[in-house]
Image (tube, rainbow, N blue to C red):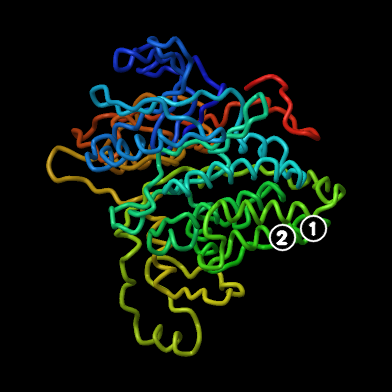
Amino acid sequence: MARTLACVDTTLQDPLVGQVLDGRYRIDARIAVGGMATVYRAVDTRLDRVLALKVMHPSLAVDASFVERFIREAKSVARLAHPNVVQVFDQGTDGSYVYLAMEYVAGCTLRDVLRERGALQPRAALDILEPVLAALGAAHRAGFVHRDMKPENVLIGDDGRVKVADFGLVRAVDTVTNTTGTVLGTVSYLAPEQIENGTADPRVDVYACGVMLYEMLTGDKPHDGDSPAVILYKHLHEDVPPPSAAVPGLAYELDEMVASATARTPDIRPHDAVALLARVRDGRGRLSADQLDVVPPQALTADHDNADDRTSVIPRALATLRPLPVNEDEEEGSAAGTNRTSRFESPPPPPSRRRPGSRRGPMAIVAAVLLVLGLGAGVWYINSGQFTEVPPLLAKTQDQAEDRLADAGLDLGKVEHAYSDTVERGQVISSDPKAGTRIRGNDSVSITISDGPRTCVCPPWRAGGWTRRGSC
């Protein structure tokens, strides 16, 4: 989520704003709030330079194994020097705060551009994709996987430079198959193998880049649905459609780039970002100037529901649970060729054409549903006696949060508002105390409601690159 931008809200009441962290970093303003951390604009008082400070949420900071891995991998990524990668300067802890000190990029994100303009011309889309792939390629060849590529993590500076952010979630390639208990990622960009078994090698970044290319060319995501469960199901069972189906006039080579990167069978995809970059450059070389400058219909301007774009910590155990036993009638239906469904949720829509080698069964459907249940509402309970646990309130409306608190025997306390690029307007960003905290019955819980993203003025794209037009 590391949103190292110039978009800040100096009016937010944040306990860290104005503080000096670790005796060195003076926090001036909050930049953004995400599912795993909050990013601040800060000043390194030793070197007298502005930087971005990413502070892990305390609820994650109490997990010693998570913090240990975070620190170890952050140190490794800090050695990754590439002009298209947001640099990591320092890492440390100060009491309960675990932080990363990173390069501060004044500008906006690819998400801001897509939100403002919708679909981009192929030339602009490829101008953004190529440096992203160059950055990921350097990471892949150094032995790292990003695992959470999405438009929010692509920064476009006021000077036109493109940088990839949030390498704090990467894992070393040689440890990606280890069972660590969690899967990190964002629903709309997860590769099928991440959903099914948590596998994360360079090809999951390739898949996410294919989804981003489709989104840049069409102004919308390839898979949508009424719930994250439907989106996960489609990633498992449906091919990403060719962008030309949504934007007539797009060249076949662009369809080919998207299809290659988003193949549901990992072995069919380019093996890493370097290989995909080679294919993209080859395809681009076969496009004429007219094909690169196709103007997409602005009717496709996207107004995304960013609730599904949050980086999430998904319990790995949920992805391996088996469905409950089915009755004889359900077994007979399965034998007759219909999809057997579990008792967790109503059956998803029927699958579309499958690619060769892509085999997904009822187990995958249940895994997708359970993954979402782990992401969203969750399960809460009231302890016996005079104490109760604060229920999960994230991504709920104020009314829904108040109802949940009432069901738990708690009152709604103070309601504050804050800007967020990752949480939909009107939904809960955080609660105080946090979910799972044991407090006395009839106590109150304060919440912070998202006011949506802070409006940014993004640099326009012109032939030859991005040109500066103010800042966020």
Disc on res. 255: 2
Q: Is residue 293 above or below residue 362?
A: above
Q: Label 2 sits on what residue type? A: Asp
Give the secondary structure at mark 1. loop
Q: Is residue 129 left or right of residue 247?
A: left
Rendered location of residue 466, percent (x, y): 72, 31
Labels 1 & 2 near each other (Cβ < 8 A): yes
Q: Position of residue 234 (x, y in %)?
A: 55, 64
- Kind of residue at badge 1: Ala
Q: Residue at x 33, y 54 (%)?
A: 175
Q: Which residue is mark 1?
A: 251
How many residues crowd around disc 1 within 10 Å: few (fewer than 14), some, or many (20 or more)?
Answer: many
Does 240 sit above or below residue 14? below
The percent position of residue 121, horizontal first and vertical second, equals 77, 44
Q: Which residue lies most toward the right here?
A: 290
Residue at 29% x, 57% y is 179
